[in-house]
Image (cartoon, helix red, strand yellow):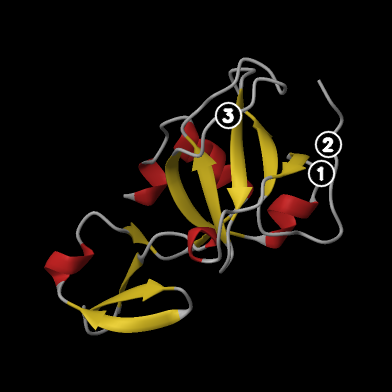
């Protein structure tokens, strides 16, 4: 297995290999707004990279997850345009009032619960939680 390469300067479009407990690899791509898209493709090895830009999910990720060397930097895949570099809209729920909002491209707007259904909940994730989710382990999320 390749030794983890880290980058001092994280760039939009950077692609990382994420080693999984089953000895396969997931891959993630850096988006604007701390977004991190996890590719649908799971590779048999670190060189079995995704051939298209299809994602299982997109969440916020802590920078130290990208800089620790646990995940291997592979390449930079530039986005076709600025709009594509932003993660999809995410839902925010106020823990005190229960009101819904949608976060997208750095802006927050009030929303109805029905508008928020099916959207990812806005949060910043650590590496181990991302690995758990890829592996289908979501008991901590419930």
Which quarter of the picture shows residue 131?
A: top right
The residue carrying pointer 2 sits among few (fewer than 14), some (14 to 19) or many (20 or more) residues within 10 Å by Cα, namely: some
From the viewer's perspective, is residue 118 above or below residue 136?
below
Q: How far from the left and from the top, in percent, is residue 120?
A: 35, 57
Gap in angstroms between the C-alphas marked 2 and 1: 5 Å
* SS at badge 2: loop
Q: Position of residue 59 (x, y in %)?
A: 48, 55
- Secondary structure of the residue carrying tag 1 is loop
Nearer the observer: mark 3 or 1; the answer is: 3
Of 74 and 25, which appears nearest the observer?
A: 74
Q: Residue at x 36, y 65 (%)?
A: 90
Given this view, does label 2 or label 3 mark the residue nearer the observer?
3
> In the rendering, at what x and y percent does residue 3 appear?
87, 30
Q: Is residue 59 left or right of residue 14?
A: left
Instruction: Name the foreground residue: 93 vs 58.
Output: 58
- Label 2 and label 3: CA atoms lie apart by 19 Å
Tell me the quadrant of the picture where the N terminus can be found.
Answer: top right
Q: Which residue is mark 3?
A: 50
Q: Are marks 2 and 1 in contact (CB under 8 Å)?
A: yes
| Residue furthest out toward the front | 80
**Residue at mark 2:** 4
The residue identified by callout 1 is 69
Residue at 68% in and 43% down: 15
Query: Disc 3 or 1, which lies upstream in sequence?
Result: 3
Q: Label 1: few (<14), some or many (≥20) within 10 Å?
A: some
Q: CA distance from mark 3 to mark 1?
A: 20 Å
Mark 3 element type: loop
- Classify 10 Å Cα crowding around label 3: few (below 14), some (14-19), many (20 and above): some
């Amino acid at each position: 297995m390749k030794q983890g390469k880290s980058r001092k300067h994280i760039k939009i479009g950077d692609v990382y290999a994420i080693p999984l407990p089953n000895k396969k690899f997931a891959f993630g791509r850096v988006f604007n707004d701390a977004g991190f898209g996890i590719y649908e493709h799971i590779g048999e090895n670190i060189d079995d990279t995704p051939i298209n830009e299809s994602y299982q999910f997109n969440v916020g990720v802590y920078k130290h997850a990208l800089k620790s060397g646990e995940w291997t930097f592979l390449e930079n895949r530039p986005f076709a345009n600025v709009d594509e570099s932003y993660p999809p809209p995410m839902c925010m729920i106020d823990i005190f009032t229960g009101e819904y909002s949608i976060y997208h491209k750095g802006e927050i707007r009030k929303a109805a619960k029905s508008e928020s259904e099916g959207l990812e909940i806005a949060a910043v994730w650590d590496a181990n939680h991302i690995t758990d989710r890829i592996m289908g382990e979501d008991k901590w999320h419930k």
